[in-house]
Image (spheres, rainbow, N blue to C red):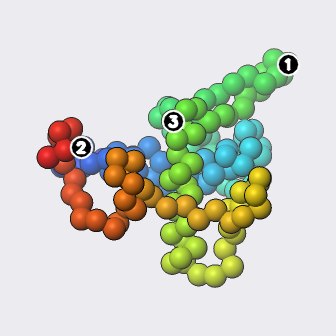
Amino acid sequence: MNEKNISLLRCPVARGLESVGDTWSILILRDAFAGLTRFDQFRKNLGIAPTMLTKRLAALTDDGLLEKRLYSERPPREEYVLTEAGQDFLPVLMMIGAWAQRNCGENLARYIDDETGVEIQPIGVDAMTGAKLGSRPMRMSLTNTGN
């Protein structure tokens, strides 16, 4: 990020994209939510070059979205599991998917609730007011006072 632009340093969108702002990182997180944990699983599912996958997994680990856990001592092997911060990214993934379903063509996969079998239609809602995001005027504030 260009540190000369102070507004970008305080912008939550810019800071979030700094952690997960490339296609590979977001797809790795998607696959982690689907239950993939091992390097070879990610590589096979994504068709990503091993060097690129190594870099992305390291960045996601450094940024606290994934953590490495030893699953075999002989030979030593590690898997990647979602942290609390990584788990917190699921609604973002679902909102990206919902946006794509509305705006990026037909015949895309859908989210289905395993318990009910009903399609999930994610929406963003303000927890304080209950208002659907985008339904009311808003602005970004650099203070925590709501000003």
Q: Position of residue 47 (x, y in %)?
A: 71, 58
Residue 125 x, y percent position in the rendering: 42, 56
Name the outermost residue toward the top. 73
The residue mark sitting in front, 1 or 2, is 2
Residue at (76% x, 54% y) in the render? 114
Assess disc 1: are there few (<14), some (14-19) or many (≥20) residues with their C-alpha within 10 Å of its C-alpha: few
Is 29 drawn above or below residue 95 in the view shown? above
Mark earlier in primary sequence (1, 2): 2
Question: Where does the image place residue 35, in percent across and percent down from the top left?
Answer: 74, 44
Left or right for 57, reference 63? right
As drawn, the label of residue 45 is: none
Residue 74 — which label?
Answer: 1
Looking at the rendering, which quadrant does residue 39 occupy? top right
The answer to whether the residue labelled 1 contacts the one labelled 2, judged by CB atoms less than 8 Å apart, is: no
Residue picked out by circle 2: 10
Along the line of sight, the residue nearer the viewer: 105 or 141: 141
The residue positioned 71% from the left and 57% from the top of the image is 113
Looking at the image, tell me whether mark 3 or mark 1 is earlier in sequence order: 1
User: Element under label 3?
Assistant: helix
Dot 2 or dot 3: first in sequence order is: 2
Q: Classify mark 1: helix, strand or loop.
A: loop
In this image, 10 relative to 33: left or right? left
Residue at the spot 59% in from the left edge and 81% down from the top edge = 105
What amino acid is labelled 1 in the image?
Arg
Tag of residue 85: 3
**Which residue is outermost to the front?**
129
Q: Secondary structure at mark 2?
A: helix
Q: Is residue 79 visible?
A: yes
Residue drawn at x 82%, y 22% is 72
Q: Residue 23: which quarter of the image?
A: bottom right
Measured in 3D between alpha carbons, the distance from the residue under mark 2 to the one under mark 3, in whole angstroms, is: 19 Å
